[in-house]
Image (cartoon, helix red, strand yellow):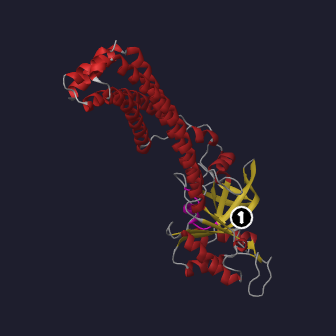
Amino acid sequence: MWRILVSEFLSDLKSQRKRALLTTFAVTWGTLSVVLLLSFGEGLRRTFVDGQLGAGDRIFKIYSGTTSQTHEGLPKGRRIRLREADLELLERSIPEIDLTSPSYGRGSTTLEHGDVRTTTYMEGVEPAFSELRSMDPAPGGRFLNARDLEERRRVLFLGDEIAVDLFGNSDPVGETVRLDGLPFTVVGTMREKFQSSMSNGPDAERAIIPATTFRAIYGREYVSHLLVRPRSVERAPATKREIRRVLGSRHAFAADDERALPMWDFIESEEQISKIGLGIQIFLGLVGAFTLLVAGVGVANIMYVVVRERTREIGIKRAVGARRRHVVAQFVFEAMMLTLIGGAIGMALASAIVVGVDSIPAGNQAMQYLMNPKLSWPIALSALAILTGIGLAAGVLPARRAARLDPVESLRYE
């Protein structure tokens, strides 16, 4: 039976070359549209998430705040200020906490090397800050270590862009930089990363020193914020509640007073960004699917024409014993073949375009959102499912009409 179906399809293809070519082109264009739109949507979603992860990986940034509720006889409007001792208390009290680091921030810090002078945002942190904030050292250098903290060393870790500002193309590791007039040794620079979410400027323009060194130089008592990473994403909401409870007990504020202890929840932000990206991808996919649907209408039209032109042939087949399902199978097969051939060509062209565009280096972060399409198996399977559905719909309706034709009336058809 399959041999007969293929033979009839090839015969019909020869007699309907122009129509078949135009129909195949329509399906190719529709497939190309849906795959490209889904691929660019997937790339956009991944870029959103990567940009968020560039600022921090599954962390809470905990800030000092002001109470908005009265609590245990104390008025609202009290300032809550955090110290490193608060972080130590959290580590002892909440087993779900994995990594932590304090952060002491200082804006407009002056950096000098030779004749070059610049200002930037500087932070005093602990070694875990590198993993928490995705600030990986470039080859040949390192981040801060425990010994730097213990000995209060004057060592400096630089963002990749500020390192270029100070040293040009030279290797800065081991060189001396004067930070607010004091000599510091550069121990490493940050590996280049993509970052779309930030506070006090991008990490690429940041200077990092040990927290103990920061306190010794500037005499700061209170931290700018605390960084905490829970062990489990699933347990993150419970961990957040425990943080508010523990610190609320220590500083005498209500555990549900969010203004007393503001938090930037990177886990929640990542989920929201991922949902936004998925929504954009679904919208683009629907636009492409409607384009492909127009091509499906073209396939259905040509199949209706074929049914009309081959009415006598259908009548002869029915007269010699062909069953309705044989007639239906013939036209559904032809519609599916036209759809899948056009779909395969469109998929191949889309894959080539995606690979080509993805290989072009993005000139800036804005272009990185557009020049990052990703073709994945879910996208390919989604396109195949849409094609199959359209092919079946375009073939079944004309085929059922053909199968319902009366053999005697079909033989009289001119």
Q: Is residue 336 above or below residue 51?
A: above
Which residue is most to the bottom? Answer: 73
> Residue 369: x percent and y percent?
59, 42
Residue 133 is a magenta residue: yes
Q: Residue at x 60, y 70 (%)?
A: 149
Camera-side residue: 181 or 396? 396
Farthest residue, direction top? 414
- Please name the residue that numbered disc 1 is placed on: 105
Which residues, given as a range, are shown in magenta? Answer: 125-136
The answer to whether residue 273 is magenta is no
Figure quadrant of residue 24: top left
User: Quick check: 345 left or right of 188?
Assistant: left
Quadrant in which the N terminus is drawn? top left
Closer-to-camera residue (140/313): 313
At label 1, the amino acid type is Gly
* Whole-percent x, y for residue 219 in the image: 75, 73
Query: Residue 246: which quarter of the image?
Result: bottom right
Q: How many marks?
A: 1
Pinpoint residue 94: horizontal percent, then vertical percent: 55, 78
Q: Is residue 198 above or below residue 250?
A: above
User: Could one spot residue 18 in this view of the protein?
Assistant: yes
Instruction: Compare residues 387 and 380 and report the one nearer the observer.
Output: 387
* Residue at point 50%, 36% (across, down): 289
Residue 193 in sight in this render: no
Element on which disc 1 rests = strand
Q: Residues within 10 Å of mark 1 (few under 14, many from 20)?
A: some
Q: Position of residue 4 (x, y in %)?
A: 22, 24
Q: Residue at x 26, y 32 (%)?
A: 325
Instruction: Classify the position of the C terminus by image quarter.
Output: top left
Q: Is residue 30 left or right of residue 59?
A: left
